[in-house]
Image (cartoon, rainbow, N blue to C red):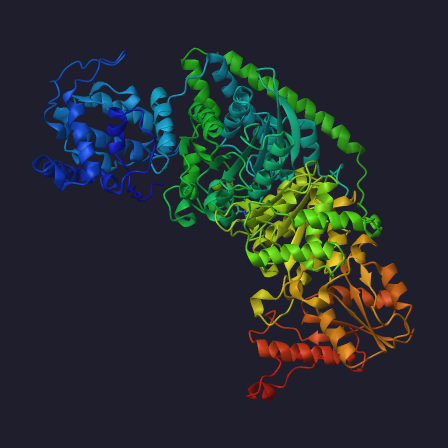
């Protein structure tokens, strides 16, 4: 499966020389001039430059001048005798006066370090890799006759004089054996040097004790035995066999064994289907009995209240012993079928676990491990999004260890159709991560890399990738026939010996184990499996299959006291508007803060930004920590929040919410990268492990949340039912029609409502700052843990109509339904609505002095407080016409959700008034928007027929009208 070689440009062979001349040199970016000779073919360029320098030192760049001066000097000094260095057995002494061959040696070192992986024996099924002409001797203008000449070997394995033959053998052993490494793209020289020295010290050869080697063999046998047991006992049942990639289990075991001595207490794992059952049993210690029970056809999930999930998506947590005696906490996050969607969730969980372990600086106690498939790693965009979080202040986790079970196939698709890159690990290169490719048939090599990976992660706090190149012994799953599409590959796989046999042979040959001992290991594992199978049959025979009742949570509608005393609010207003004396801030921001102080003191009504700040501040001072993340969330997309203010001269940042009191809980606010899926997934993961914290994710505009639809569908709305996991995550989604076009109007309220069932979340569209204040506090303070979706305002942020008297936060609580503020009873028509359109309706009502029509707001659409709604409606005429008015198109907004519920609840038909159904959420024209908006408001107050909600009367704008030159609403329903 060889692919065309990627070019490797811009690297610095001079690093070797510079290192040699001055080993204490601090790392720095390579000089652009030095960068030109990165490719071995550029030797000519080096020679030319060298000639120029010899003729006139001033004619070359100063960096080159220093280089050649140092180089000449270095070459005149005979290299010191190196203890343990091989003395050349034959050949002539190096010609130190002639620097060019020596320079070519440095180029050779560089080239092997950069491209040696192209010659590495990585593919268990592959033949010897094709020659890479960039690494041939002739490229460096050497011939076989030079092989016994002695050269300075630069930094190679400690340096010293070596023959060319020895140098080549050293390089090939280190970089072209069963481990192929990509690390010369790393721009940080300290990291590069550390990796180089670490690898060259061991020549990338594993050095495990006999006991460790036996343990690794046992793990491989355990992995294989479990698959075979399942294969014969549960024929054809899906398990996504790991066979061909059993090395994964040895790698994970070695990693966990290395944790105690590296200061790691906990490992948070995310992985997809392949080998998951094997990891659960052989790494996390899930009992075989439990697993076999899940395989049984009568199995009904015992512990899940909701619908449960298939066995290869379930999560697990356990404390597992290590041979050091110390235990390590392991968790495998449950995950949906959607490949790689779990990645940011695991990162968020890991960061939350770090917080729990007071590990927020070095982040060395909790390590995230992500296990990927080759097809998914290169194919799914969320991989790149998640990698991009890894160094960011608000999202870093101290380095993730990525392991790829690279079986060189994705379902039926081969790498040639899967990727445009040589390796599936290419996304890691964008971040300059070290990438280790290892032959999966060599578990010892892979295990040695994972030890290095953990050491690297603990030292540099960066991500690292281990690519286990293996194969898939069977089809994609156990019902899949691989011979339909890959007949040749599979005939090769059929005759390929299993990993266990290859490793057993090695250990037998080394005298580290006997055939009898190997058989004993196999027998023991099979006995354990057999006993567990019998036990599981007894368990299953007692199961009474029954359909679970739907999840429900009536307490979601219970009132939660969320008012804050006036004195406290005023005090918070003072804290939030106080900036250190030596801080100079923008005058407009100063005014915002002064206004907030006046608002909190009750001198002027509260706006949205102030209400939010007061809600946050009141929670923080009573001990609830808060994390808010989103694009530009510190300032707020619409410049309404200003959670951070900046010094005019230094741009020093000051966050009032972090400085309210010495005893307050922590407030974390981050501007996120421009990603939805990964950031929302991260914050969701964080919220799972920090239920005591209010975690909020904010979309720039609500529309953009659909970039994270997988996280919303697969986790936020359904995880409680599938896996029993609960989250308090709050989504702030700017929504509302302001004539800004199709893309900045809708947070797709309808999609959230369509996902609502079994009290799985709360969907709200508050219209006043005070109600938002209570909503946020309720979400943080109540014991029930549910996700909250909030449609948040844009234009209303600065609208005097959408303000609240301070008494509305010092009294009362969240109002799911708001009655008409002026028409309390006796109305003959009731307009039900939600959100921003209320203010347009209210303006019309006031302007036209309408007294017979009440406007009632649903501030919480799901779960609907039906008791409150019917009580408020009962204050009006029993014959009142009831209509639903919205500014969203008929197929959007809350209408279709409510149309299914309101008629049976109210026992009468409900008329729809609003824009007609449309494919695009809104018009691109401001003037048409305004016409449409005025028209729908007018229609709401006009008397009309009451068609059945299920068969609404279509009133479309006539086609002739569309041709009219004057602006025409697109379409309108009345
Ligand atoms: C987002 C997404 N798209 C498609 C699928 C269907 N699917 C399941 S496994 C698979 C192949 C995955 O290949 P790879 O990542 O190499 O893992 P492997 O099965 O080879 O271990 C596909 C396409 C999925 N689960 N998720
Ligand atoms: Mg694969």
| x and y, in percent, of residue 490 in the image | 44, 39
Which of the pair 266/283 is nearer the observer? 266
> Can you see residue 336?
no
> Is the residue 917 above or below the residue 29 in the image?
below
Q: Quadrant of the N terminus?
A: top left
Corner quadrant of residue 912: bottom right
Point out the residue furthest to the left here: 55
> Is the residue 508 above or below the residue 470 in the image?
above
Which of the pair 620/566 is nearer the observer? 566
Tell me which residue sits at (41%, 50%) in the image: 417
Corner quadrant of residue 344: top right
Tell me if 606 is positioned left or right of 487 in this view.
right
Q: Quadrant of the C terminus?
A: bottom right
> Can you see residue 570?
yes
| x and y, in percent, of residue 178 in the image | 37, 28
Which of the pair 90/539 is nearer the observer? 90
Tell me which residue sits at (57%, 70%) in the image: 741
| x and y, in percent, of residue 905 in the image | 86, 64
Which of the pair 237/921 is nearer the observer? 921
Point out the residue furthest to the front here: 581
Corner quadrant of residue 798: bottom right
| x and y, in percent, of residue 487 in the image | 43, 43
Tell me if 79 is positioned left or right of 728 in this view.
left
């Amino acid at each position: 499966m060889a692919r065309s070689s990627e070019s490797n440009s811009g690297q610095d062979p001079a690093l070797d020389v510079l290192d040699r001349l001055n080993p204490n040199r601090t790392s720095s970016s390579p000089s652009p001039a030095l960068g030109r000779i990165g490719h071995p073919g550029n030797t000519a360029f080096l020679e030319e430059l060298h000639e120029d320098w010899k003729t006139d030192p001033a004619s070359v760049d100063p960096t080159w001048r220093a280089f050649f001066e140092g180089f000449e000097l270095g070459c005149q000094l005979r290299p010191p005798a190196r203890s343990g260095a091989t003395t050349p057995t034959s050949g002539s002494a190096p010609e130190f006066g002639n620097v060019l061959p020596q320079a070519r040696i440095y180029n050779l070192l560089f080239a092997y370090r950069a491209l040696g992986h192209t010659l590495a024996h990585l593919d268990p099924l592959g033949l010897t890799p094709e020659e890479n002409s960039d690494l041939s001797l002739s490229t460096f203008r050497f011939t076989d006759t030079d092989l016994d000449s002695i050269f300075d070997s630069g930094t190679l394995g400690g340096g010293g004089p070596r023959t060319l033959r020895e140098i080549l053998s050293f390089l090939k052993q280190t970089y072209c054996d069963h481990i192929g490494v990509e690390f010369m793209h790393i721009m940080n020289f300290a990291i590069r040097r550390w990796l180089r020295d670490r690898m060259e010290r061991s020549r990338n050869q594993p050095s495990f004790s006999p006991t460790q080697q036996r343990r690794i063999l046992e793990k491989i046998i355990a992995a294989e035995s479990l698959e075979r047991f399942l294969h014969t006992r549960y024929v054809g049942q899906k398990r996504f066999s790991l066979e061909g990639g059993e090395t994964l289990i040895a790698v994970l075991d070695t990693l966990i064994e290395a944790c105690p001595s590296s200061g790691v207490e906990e490992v948070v794992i995310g992985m997809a289907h392949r080998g998951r059952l094997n990891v659960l049993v052989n790494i996390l210690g899930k009992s075989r009995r439990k697993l076999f029970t899940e395989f049984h056809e009568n199995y009904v999930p015992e512990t899940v209240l909701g619908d449960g999930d298939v066995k290869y998506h379930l999560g697990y947590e356990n404390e597992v012993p290590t041979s050091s005696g110390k235990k390590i906490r392991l968790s495998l996050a449950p995950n949906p079928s959607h490949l790689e969607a779990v990645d940011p969730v695991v990162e968020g969980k890991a960061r939350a676990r770090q917080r729990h372990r007071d590990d927020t600086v070095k982040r060395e106690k909790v390590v995230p491990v992500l296990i990927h498939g080759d097809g998914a790693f290169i194919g799914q965009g969320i991989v790149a999004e998640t990698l991009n979080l890894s160094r960011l202040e608000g999202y870093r986790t101290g380095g993730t260890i990525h392991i790829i079970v690279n079986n060189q196939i994705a379902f039926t698709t081969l790498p040639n159709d899967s990727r445009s890159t040589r390796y599936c690990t290419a996304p890691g290169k964008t971040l300059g991560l070290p990438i280790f490719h290892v032959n999966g048939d060599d578990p010892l090599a892979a295990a040695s890399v994972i030890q290095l990976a953990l050491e690297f992660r603990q030292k540099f706090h960066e991500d690292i990738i281990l690519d286990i190149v293996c194969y898939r012994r069977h089809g994609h799953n156990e019902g899949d026939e691989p011979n339909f599409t890959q007949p040749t590959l599979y005939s090769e796989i059929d005759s390929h010996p299993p990993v266990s046999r290859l490793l057993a042979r090695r250990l037998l040959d080394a005298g580290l184990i006997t055939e009898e001992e190997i058989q004993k290991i196999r027998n023991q594992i099979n006995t354990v499996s057999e006993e567990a199978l019998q036990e599981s049959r007894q368990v299953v025979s007692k199961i009474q299959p029954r359909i679970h009742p739907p999840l429900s949570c009536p307490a979601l509608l219970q009132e939660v006291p969320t008012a804050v005393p006036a004195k406290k609010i005023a005090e918070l207003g003072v804290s939030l508007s106080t900036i250190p004396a030596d801080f100079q801030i923008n005058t407009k921001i100063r005014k915002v803060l002064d206004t907030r102080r006046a608002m909190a003191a009750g001198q002027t009504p509260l706006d949205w930004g102030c209400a939010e700040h007061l809600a946050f501040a009141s929670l923080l001072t009573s001990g609830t920590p808060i994390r808010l993340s989103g694009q530009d969330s510190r300032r707020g997309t619409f410049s309404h929040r200003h959670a951070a203010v900046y010094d005019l001269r230094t741009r020093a940042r000051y966050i009032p919410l972090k400085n309210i009191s010495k005893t307050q809980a922590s407030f974390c606010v981050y501007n996120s990268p421009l990603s939805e899926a990964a950031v929302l997934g991260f914050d969701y993961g964080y919220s799972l492990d920090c239920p005591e914290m209010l975690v909020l994710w904010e979309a720039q505009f609500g529309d953009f949340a659909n970039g994270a639809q997988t996280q919303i569908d697969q986790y936020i709305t359904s995880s409680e039912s599938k896996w029993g996991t609960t989250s308090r995550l709050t989504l702030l989604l700017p929504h509302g029609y302001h004539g800004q076009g199709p893309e900045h109007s809708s947070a797709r309220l309808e999609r959230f409502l369509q996902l609502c069932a079994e009290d799985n979340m709360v969907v709200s569209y508050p219209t006043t700052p005070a109600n938002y204040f209570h909503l946020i506090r309720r979400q943080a303070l109540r014991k029930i843990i549910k996700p909250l979706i909030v449609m948040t305002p844009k234009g209303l942020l600065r609208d005097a109509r959408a303000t609240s008297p301070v008494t509305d936060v010092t009294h009362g609580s969240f109002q799911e339904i708001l009655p008409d503020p002026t028409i309390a009873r006796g109305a003959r028509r009731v307009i039900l609505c939600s959100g921003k359109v209320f203010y347009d309706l209210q303006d019309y009502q006031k302007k036209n002095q309408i007294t017979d029509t009440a406007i009632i707001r649903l501030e919480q659409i799901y779960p609907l407080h039906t008791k409150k709604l019917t009580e408020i409606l009962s204050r009006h005429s029993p014959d009142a016409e009831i209509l639903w008015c919205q500014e969203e198109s008929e197929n959007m907004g809350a209408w279709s959700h409510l149309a299914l519920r309101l008629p049976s609840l109210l026992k009468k038909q409900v008329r729809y008034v609003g824009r007609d159904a449309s494919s695009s959420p809104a018009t691109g024209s401001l003037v048409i928007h305004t016409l449409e908006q005025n028209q729908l408001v007018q229609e709401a107050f006009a008397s009309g027929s009451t068609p059945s909600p299920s068969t609404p009367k279509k009133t479309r704008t006539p086609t002739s009208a569309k041709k009219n030159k004057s602006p025409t609403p697109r379409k309108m329903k009345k």
